Amino acid sequence: MLSRLERFSSWQRPKTAIALCMKYKQHLKMSINKALRRFPVKEPNSGRSSDGKSCPVVASVMVNDLKQAEVEVIKLVQADTFEREMKALKDLQADVKCESRQHDTEIKVAMKKSSSLHTLDSFLDCNGVLRAGGRIKKANLSGSLKNPVILPNADQVTKLIIRHVHEKTQHSGRGVEL
């Protein structure tokens, strides 16, 4: 899946493509559930819906769809790059609520010095996205500003996001973008 994301030249296009795929997947699930309620017989069909027409492609993408697609792409990139670290964090945070940060020392031990994330006080948020922690967590800021998303250094998606923010801030510079 990540190899397909390398073909995009702007951050908006992969988000839209993933959002459309997610909407289409949701549409297919609803169609299958509806068909199973009508016809519980398990017979293979010819790729057409129960009324004989082909399934329509969902064309409208809402802002929430784009945000969810962005989260899914970031999770995919992080899972590919930080697989070992995310597994360790999932194991530690399995029994703890999303907002709780009581196991800081256990997390630091799990993030061995061989990991590139050991100095970032990293954690998984409610969506399963890897974020950086730190002393700023007591500041009166939104969660996304206090705990930025951790992205791999040399990745196409990271480059697309940085380019998108660079253009959105009218080529301001590193201080504004990061």
Image (cartoon, helix red, strand yellow):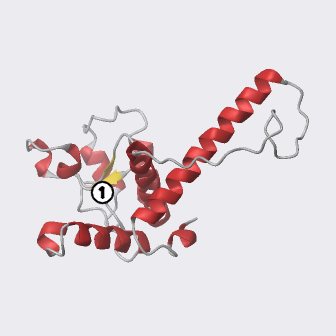
Q: Is residue 78 left or right of residue 150?
A: right
Residue drawn at the location 83% of the way across and 38% of the way down: 52
Residue drawn at the location 25% of the way across and 47% of the way down: 105
Location of residue 3 with respect to 16 vertically, above or below: below
Residue 79 in sight from this viewpoint: yes
Residue drawn at the location 33% of the way across and 35% of the way down: 98
Location of residue 163 with respect to 38 vertically, above or below: below
Residue drawn at the location 25% of the way across and 37% of the way down: 102
Q: Nearer the viewer, residue 125 or 34?
A: 34
Q: Nearer the viewer, residue 127 or 169?
A: 169
Q: Where residue 79 appears, x then y in whole percent?
A: 47, 59
Residue 83 in sight from this viewpoint: no
Q: Is residue 139 left or right of residue 59?
A: left
Q: Nearer the viewer, residue 93 or 128?
A: 128
Q: Where residue 101 appears, x then y in whole percent?
A: 25, 39
Q: Where residue 154 appears, x then y in whole percent?
A: 38, 77
Location of residue 59 with respect to 10 vertically, above or below: above
Location of residue 50 with respect to 150 vertically, above or below: above
| Count of marks overlaid on the render | 1
Q: Determine whether the residue tagged by mark 1 lies in a helix, strand or loop.
A: loop
Under mark 1, the amino acid is: Val
Q: Is residue 126 left or right of residue 76?
A: left
Q: Quadrant of the C terminus?
A: bottom left
Q: Where residue 15 appears, x then y in whole percent?
A: 45, 58
Q: Quadrant of the N terminus?
A: bottom right
Residue linked to disc 1: 149
Q: Nearer the viewer, residue 1 or 19?
A: 19
Dot 1, crowdedness within 10 Å: few (<14), some or many (≥20)?
some
